[in-house]
Image (cartoon, rainbow, N blue to C red):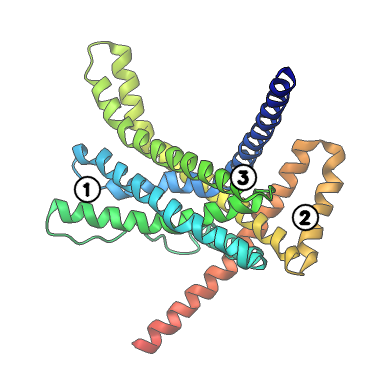
Amino acid sequence: MAGGLFALLDDISVLAKAAASSIDDVATGAAKTAVKTSGVIVDDVAAAPQYVTGLSPKRELPVVWKITKGSLANKFLIVIPLLLILSWIAPVLFPYLLIIGGTYLSYEGAEKALEWMHIVKEEHHSAEVVADTPEALEKSMVRSAVMTDLVLSMEIMTISLSTIHAHGFWTRLATLCVVAILMTVLVYGAVAALIRLDDTGRFMARRRSRWVRILGLGMIRAMPKVFDLLSIVGTLAMLWVGGHLIWENLGEVGLHFFHDTLHGLEHVLEPAGGLVSWLGTAVVSMVGGLVWGTVVFLLVRGAMKIVKTSRG
C-alpha cells in the first residue's frame, strides 16, 4: 500500500513538472510574440479610435466592445485554425507568408514616412461610411473595423506561430490562444482607455480644485499629441518588424545574403554590448523595411495610376 502511494505521488510529481514546463513554454512564447508584434499592436491602438468617430459618446465603449468580440472571433474561428492547418499540411509556406506580412508592414510604414516627409500627399485611411441612421452607422463602423482587424490578426498570429519553438500541438495551440486573448485585451483595452481620457479630462476641468482643473485641461490638450506620438512609434516599429521579417525569411527561402548580413552586423557589434548590437540590427532592419516598403509603395502607386488611366 505504501509503495503504491509513493508511486502515485511520483506520477503526480512528474505530471506537475510536465505541466509547469508546458506553462513555461507558453509564457515564453507569448513574451517573444509581444516583442515581435509590437509594431502592429501600437499602430492598431493608434488607428482604432477612428472607428468611433462621429458616434455618440454613450455608444463609444459599446462599439469598442463589439469590435473586441469581433476580433476574438477572427482569431479563434478563422486565424488560429487556418494557421494550424497550414503548419500541418504546408509548413514550407510560412517563410513566404512572413515575407508577405513583412512587406505589408513595410508598405504601411513607408507610406506614412513618405507622408511625413511630404514626398507623397497625405491621405486619410479611415473607412468611408455612408449611413442614414445612427444604428446603420454603428453597424458599418463595426463591420469595417472587424475586417481591418482580420488582416492585423492574421499578421500577429502568423508572427506568433513563427516564434513558437515547441513541437507539441497542444503547447502551440495554448500559446496562440494566450497570445490572442492578451493582444486583443491589450489593444482594445488601450483604445477604450484612450477614448475616455478626454472625457476624464473634461470632468476634472470642471472640479473646484485648481490643480485638478489644470491637470484636466492638460489631459485634454495632450490627447492629440499622444495620438501623434503613438502614430510615430507605431510606424517606426512597423518598419523595424517588417524589415526584420523580410531579412530573416529571405534567408529561409534561399536568399542568404540579407540574413547573413544582418547576423554579421550583430556579430561585429556584439563586443560593444547587447544594447548596441540590438540597436544596430534594429536600425538596419528599419532602413531595410523603409527601402523595401518604398519600392512596393511606388510599384503599387504606379499600377493604380496605370489602371486609372486605362479606365479613363
> What numbered label is drawn on residue 171?
3
For label 1, the crowd category at 10 Å Cα-Cα, with few meaning under 14, some 14 to 19 and many 20 or more, is: few
Q: Residues within 10 Å of mark 3 (few under 14, many from 20)?
A: some
Which of the two residues, 148 or 218, is positioned nearer the viewer here? 148
Horizontal arrangement in the rendering, residue 76 relative to residue 167 (left or right): left
- Mark positioned earlier in the residue sequence (2 or 3): 3
Give the residue furthest to the top: 209
Image depth: mark 1 or mark 3 in front:
3
Q: Find numbered disc 2 in the image and state the secondary structure of the residue it sits on.
A: helix
Asked if residue 254 can be seen in this view, the reply is yes
The amino acid sitting under disc 3 is Thr
Quadrant of the rendering where the C terminus is positioned: bottom left
Q: Quick check: 106 above or below 5?
A: below
Q: Position of residue 249 (x, y in %)?
A: 70, 62
Rendering quarter of residue 228:
top left
Query: What residue is shown with label 2?
Result: 262
| Alpha carbons under labels 1 and 3: distance apart | 43 Å
Residue at the (47%, 53%) spot, across then down: 153
N-terminal of the pair, mark 1 or mark 3, is 1
Q: Which mark is residue 73?
A: none
Q: Position of residue 13 (x, y in %)?
A: 69, 26
Which amino acid lies under the numbered mark 2 shown in the image of this protein? Answer: Leu
Q: Residue at x 25, y 26 (%)?
A: 202
Secondary structure of the residue carrying tag 3 is helix
At x 19% / y 55%, what residue is drawn? 137
The structure residue drawn at horizontal position 43% and vertical position 38%, both measured from the top left corner, is 185
Q: Residue furthest left?
A: 133
Crowding around mark 2 (Cα neighbors within 10 Å: few <14, some 14 to 19, many 20+) is: some
Examine the rendered structure and indicate whether residue 254 appears above or below residue 279: below
In the picture, the disc for residue 54 is 1
Examine the image and state in which quarter residue 262 appears.
Answer: bottom right
